[in-house]
Image (cartoon, rainbow, N blue to C red):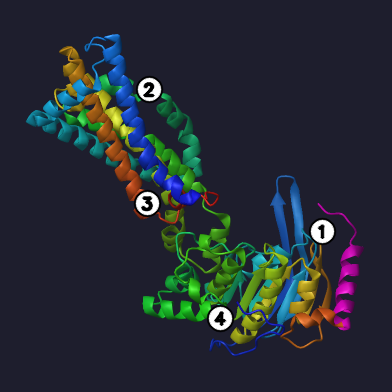
Amino acid sequence: MHMQPTVDTRPVDPIVAPPAEIRISGLEKVYKTERGATHALSDINLEIRKEEFVSLIGRSGCGKTTLLRIMAGLVPPTSGDIEIGGRALWHGESVDSSVIRKLGVVFQDSNLFPWYDIEDNIALPLRLRGVKKAARRARARELAELVGLADFLGNYPRELSGGMRQRAAIARALSDNPELLLMDEPFGALDAMTREKMNLEIQRIALATRATVVFVTHDIDEAVALGDRVVHLTPRPGRIKDIVTVPMDRPRGVEIKQDPGFHELVGNLYASLNEEGDHES
Amino acid sequence: MNRRKLLKVLPWITTPALLIVLFVVWEVTVKALGISTLILPPPSLVFEQLGQTLGEPTTWTNVRVTVTEIVLGFLAGTAAGVLVGVILGKLPLLEASVRPLIIALEVIPKVALIPLFVIWFGFGMTTKVVIAGLLAFFPVMLNVLLGVRSVDRGHRDVMQSINASRWQTFRHLEYKSMMPHVFAGMETAIVLAVIGTIVGEYLGGNEGLGYMVVKTLNELNAPALFAVILMLATVGLIMYFIVTSFKRVAIPWHESVYGRKDVG
């Protein structure tokens, strides 16, 4: 496929939806287990602008995945509020389905359904909305082109490489025009080369779809290379330690990794993460 | 030819070859040692007798009876197995409370119940259908129970994140991921349904291939007995083949169908 030194900024797709604005306030999450309670998230406050790309970074167990899962409507918060586009996502233990519809979620595993081909996998969210077959096909093709899978619509997930499967998962998340794209270490299982390429792709896709993106990763380089801001979470209890603004324009090509400003940001974050000490669980 | 192709083609060559070798060795041994045809008839005699038996119209009536019993028992057992399996899989509390009973029922040698069924349902087809169904029920039920519980967590997350309803989650996820388990159960069930039917016919009634086994035994007609056993084996193989073919059509995406990745 096309490996280029700079990010391709062609307007690929006319997917235009009014971007969301996210407000997280006083968010707490306590997991009750047999051995007592785990304070997974404490006093999380964060505002995310329209079309912003926010990286969430931290050591394992810092609650970054929990935060994302709460934002995705998968796990209810213990207290606090999340507003997306001015509407509360959670009402106690139940989610507002009209808000859920504005989200697209990409997980660490592609989680494609092995019984459907790529076209049906990408279009599954549309199928559940009752979109007609012809319209679904057209949309799946459009998205497959966006993520570089146009020739694989009829293939089954097992016939694709890990990187390609993850592209299909991204296409599925985009199928219903999400205003907010939530990604939980989406490239964590990929090799370094594929990952580099996917980093360029995701920037192009984010700009083309004008989606707001929250991107969880444990890779500092990746977090800085992609994000307008990098939110640093620390564990036990999970709280926001620091929010770093990355002042370079998006999209950013691979050459950003030669930029002294990039190195400084990465170095500072690295030091900051190291301060937490090595109390890995 | 590459290894993968070879692995596919090989059984089609070796199986007939091995059968021919078996029959030749059998024939030669019987002739050389002068074994009585009452104990071990040579294959030539068995095949001659088979030709004769197949020529009799009553044979085909018996085949029809046996096949009907197997199919009805298998279908009833499978349907009940899927239903109970789904219910118990979905309701862990109910499953926990009836589990000891299920294990007890599973361990009971069910063919020991055949005389009871004869008393209740008579010497006709009903008894055989019931025993075949009972034997087919357990493997399907247990596999489905497991299948309902083993839906991939990540797939559930996906359905939840796209706001799927309960019915949609069942239709696009739970049902689909249950199917390989249903077929695994059915493959065992069809074999057991055949066994249940035959044993049922041994013990009661005057129809079916199982009855023909008993009849030829009473006549001490060993070649005919062997011929009927060959017919039974063929019926069993065809039944099994139908189930696995159905599986190939129904779940072509599953690795038990398309073959493991590491082959070839």
State the residue in front, B30 or A15.
B30
**Residue A60 lies in what quarter of the image?**
bottom right
In contact (CB < 8 Å): disc 2 and disc 1? no
Q: Specify the segment rendered in magenta.
A: A260-281
State the residue in front, B247 or B87.
B247
Residue at x 53%, y 80% (from the top left corner) = A145
**Residue A67 lies in what quarter of the image?**
bottom right
Q: Which residue is mark 4?
A: A146
Can you say whether A175 is above or below B101 in the image? below
Which amino acid type corresponds to the residue marked 4 in the rendered image? Leu
Which amino acid type corresponds to the residue marked 3 in the rendered image? Arg
Instruction: Work out whether disc 3 and disc 4 sit on a shared chain.
Output: no
Query: Mark 3: which secondary structure?
Result: helix
Can you say whether B10 is above or below A255 in the image? above
In contact (CB < 8 Å): disc 2 and disc 4? no
Please identify the residue farthest to the left as the structure is shown.
Answer: B57
* Distance between the alpha carbons at the discs numbered 2 and 1: 56 Å
Where does the image place residue A53, in percent across and percent down from the top left?
71, 80
Q: Which residue is mark 2?
A: B109
Q: Nearer the viewer, mark 3 or mark 1?
A: 3
Chain bearing tag 1 is A
Q: Which residue is mark 1?
A: A236
Where does the image place residue B31, in percent across and percent down from the top left?
26, 14
- Mark 1 Cα shell of 10 Å, populated few (<14), some (14-19), many (≥20): some
* Distance between the alpha carbons at the discs numbered 2 and 4: 61 Å
* Distance between the alpha carbons at the discs numbered 2 and 3: 32 Å
Q: Nearer the viewer, mark 2 or mark 3?
A: 3
Left or right: B48, with A210 as reference point: left
